[in-house]
């Protein structure tokens, strides 16, 4: 296997010193997922990564990036010693970006970053060697780690860039140096740190500061904050490419036909019509897909081939995946689970509820005789001073009466529980663990259940408990 890093290249990149010659085929920050041949990076997080260097070397790490020789580790162990480990990782990322000829897309947005990043991975993989971030590695260590892992022969790279506080996006964008920067949308998220949608938009728009000269800003043209984003793109000297339903959108969303298992999208660009499908229900995925398609075109790749390859994409786990949980294969009883338990804000919750409302449960296979739509909703975090009102406002969602029961998890979601009509009120619990322990009582065969909430609400415990009731398979498996 071609080495990702040699000790000499790593020393040149970081300015550190090495205790001996070594080659690494990967980069890891976690001994639990470390593979033999990885360079282990001893970052300080909840625990100091230096405490795990000996374990990493025992598991086959080729070397460790450290700021000092850890206790219990031999001085002649394969180590790359730098003044600061995070800065050393950033230096590796910067060097990896400099040595590749890959065309790079940077993705940010309040909703849909990870899903859109994975769409782009699927779209571009058929047109060249494509490197993309794992999971949601989009923060101050996730972006440099993604870059440090990028093979030198990559043709394309997709870098997800996130934020929690002001001033975080621009340095990461400058590190990634994208040729194309895509902003999926601007919505109430991290309001406690930014105070307003305009504040969020201004931070998102700083991604354009990292664009390569002549780079393209791909912007959702349907937002109240679109003028803010376009002004920031112009100030950065970017070319602007819009997508959405607005007349000004170069990539125009003409029609979305959400089905029970797939979503069909018709779009147009420069008078050319494009028809593509997404192997998942959910109209919100259509807009993300259109932004991704526009980004592919801006990157110089083939959008026709990309639209075809998009059919291979499905939402990452916990981000809208729909599964059929088979309870009894003989009696053919089952229920469907939409697991969207990784993240939540008002915009993404509304989109998930739309998906649930459009999806048909199955009648005649359960004790109740009629399948139900059921929602398990956890707290939406970091919404700022208006958080209680924003939770209560979910009760006003159009079409919500199609949902039979809504169970609420967490102190903030208690406001929604109080605002719901009595007939729709399920349980309210303080913690997700309380509801997870009664998972069997939440469903009847034929039901479809949505589990949605911020990661910190831990409603993923409910999704996992429901999944353990039977055997899961992807609902879209085998569909045409």
Image (cartoon, rainbow, N blue to C red):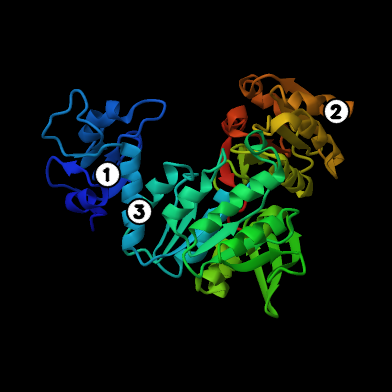
Q: Is residue 204 above or below residue 470?
A: below
> Where residue 287 sits: x, y (%)?
68, 59
Callout 3: helix, strand or loop?
Answer: helix
Note whether 243 is above or below 134 in the view shown.
below
Marks 2 and 3 sit apart, C-alpha to C-alpha, by 50 Å
Label 3, label 1: how far apart the Cα atoms are: 19 Å
Nearest the viewer among 18 and 297 is 18
Residue at x-position 32% and y-position 64%: 153
Pick whichever of labels 2 and 1 is earlier in the sequence. Answer: 1
Q: Which residue is under mark 2?
A: 419
Comparing 477 with 46, the one in front is: 46
Which residue is under mark 1?
38
- Contact, CB < 8 Å: mark 2 with mark 3? no
Q: Which mark is residue 94?
A: 3
N-term mark: 2 or 3 = 3
Camera sees residue 262: no
Label drawn at residue 81: none
Residue 316 visible somewhere in the drawing: yes
- Name the element at disc 1: strand
């Amino acid at each position: 296997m071609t080495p990702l890093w040699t000790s000499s290249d790593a020393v040149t990149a970081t300015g550190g010193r090495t205790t001996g010659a070594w080659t690494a085929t990967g980069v890891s920050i976690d001994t639990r997922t470390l593979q033999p041949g990885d360079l282990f990076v001893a970052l300080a997080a909840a625990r100091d990564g230096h405490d795990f260097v000996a374990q990493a070397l025992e598991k086959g790490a080729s070397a460790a990036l450290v700021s000092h020789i850890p206790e219990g580790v031999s001085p002649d162990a394969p180590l790359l010693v730098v003044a600061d480990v995070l800065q050393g990782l950033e230096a590796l990322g910067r060097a990896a970006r400099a040595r590749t000829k890959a065309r790079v897309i940077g993705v940010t947005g309040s909703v849909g970053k990870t899903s859109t990043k994975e769409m782009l991975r699927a779209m571009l993989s058929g047109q060249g060697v494509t490197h993309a971030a794992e999971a949601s590695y989009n923060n101050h260590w996730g972006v440099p780690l993604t870059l440090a892992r990028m093979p030198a022969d990559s043709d394309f790279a997709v870098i997800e860039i996130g934020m929690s506080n002001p001033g975080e996006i621009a340095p990461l964008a400058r590190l990634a140096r994208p040729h194309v920067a895509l902003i999926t949308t601007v919505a109430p998220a991290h309001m406690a740190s930014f105070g307003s949608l305009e504040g969020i938009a201004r931070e998102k728009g700083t991604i354009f500061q990292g664009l390569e000269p002549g780079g393209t800003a791909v912007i959702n043209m349907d937002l109240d904050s679109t003028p803010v984003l376009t002004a920031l793109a112009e100030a950065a000297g970017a070319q602007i490419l819009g997508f959405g339903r607005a007349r000004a959108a170069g990539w125009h969303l003409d029609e979305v036909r959400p089905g029970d298992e797939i979503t069909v999208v018709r779009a147009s660009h420069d008078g050319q019509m494009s028809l593509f499908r997404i192997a998942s229900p959910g109209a919100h995925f259509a807009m993300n897909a259109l932004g991704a398609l526009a980004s592919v075109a801006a990157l110089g790749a083939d959008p026709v081939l990309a639209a075809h390859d998009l059919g291979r994409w499905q939402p990452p786990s916990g981000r809208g995946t729909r599964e059929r949980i088979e309870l009894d294969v003989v009696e053919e009883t089952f229920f469907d689970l939409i697991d969207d338990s990784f993240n939540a804000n008002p915009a993404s919750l509304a989109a998930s509820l739309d998906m649930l409302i459009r999806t048909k449960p199955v009648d005649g296979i359960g004790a109740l005789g009629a399948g139900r739509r059921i929602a398990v909703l956890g707290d939406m975090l970091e919404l700022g001073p208006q958080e209680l009102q924003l939770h209560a406002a979910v009760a006003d969602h159009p079409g919500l009466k199609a949902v039979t029961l809504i169970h609420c998890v967490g102190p903030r979601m208690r406001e929604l529980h109080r605002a719901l009509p009595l007939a729709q009120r399920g349980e309210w619990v303080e913690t997700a663990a309380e509801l997870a322990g009664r998972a069997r009582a939440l469903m009847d065969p034929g039901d479809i259940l949505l589990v949605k909430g911020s990661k910190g609400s831990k409603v993923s415990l409910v999704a996992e408990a429901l999944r353990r009731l039977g055997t899961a398979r992807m609902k879209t498996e085998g569909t045409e």
